[in-house]
Amino acid sequence: MLQPQLKREWFLRHIPWCLSGAAAGLLLALGPGKWLCCLVLEHLGATGFGFDIPCPATLAVLVLICAAALAATWCSLSAIRSVTPCECLRGKEIS
């Protein structure tokens, strides 16, 4: 039966995308995102406002985002059971 192997391979291929996306989002949030938020709040009258984000909270959010993305990927792979190889090739020309 090919489905469990295909499901595992698909899941493992999504891990690097999940980690890189979460890391990029975290870096953008901690860098330009903090600056942009402070700029908007300063424009609204909250001068001298700053963000103090503790490292454990940052790591916890990173782990939760990765876990949620991987869980969503795993759940979405349940449709593989109902797909046959013939359906994947339908409408495509084989050269």
Image: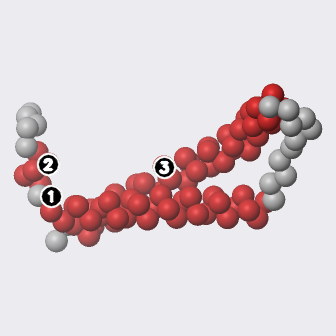
Name which residue lies at 62% across and 45% down.
25
| Furthest residue in direction top, as rendered | 43
Q: Mark 1 is on which residue type?
A: Val
Secondary structure beneath label 3: helix
Q: Mark 3 is on which residue type?
A: Trp
Tell me where residue 85 sits by quadrant.
bottom left
Name which residue lies at 7% across and 52% down.
86
Sequence-first disc among 3 and 1: 3
Name which residue lies at 63% across and 58% down.
62
Residue placed under numbered mark 3 in the picture: 17
- From this view, report whether residue 73 is shown above or below residue 49: below
Give the distance between the C-alpha atoms of the residues marked 2 and 3, in whole angstroms: 23 Å
Residue placed under numbered mark 1 in the picture: 83
Name which residue lies at 14% across and 48% down.
88
- At label 1, counting other C-alpha atoms closer than 10 Å, the crowd grade (few under 14, some 14-19, many 20 or more) is few
Q: Quadrant of the C terminus?
A: top left
User: Is mark 1 in CB contact (under 8 Å) with mark 2?
Assistant: yes
**How far across and down, in percent of the image, does residue 28 sit?**
67, 40
Residue 88's disc is: 2
Query: Image check: 20 left or right of 89?
Result: right
Residue 94 seen in render: no
Tell me where residue 24 sits by quadrant.
top right
- From this view, report whether residue 62 is shown above or below residue 42: below
**Total labels drawn:** 3
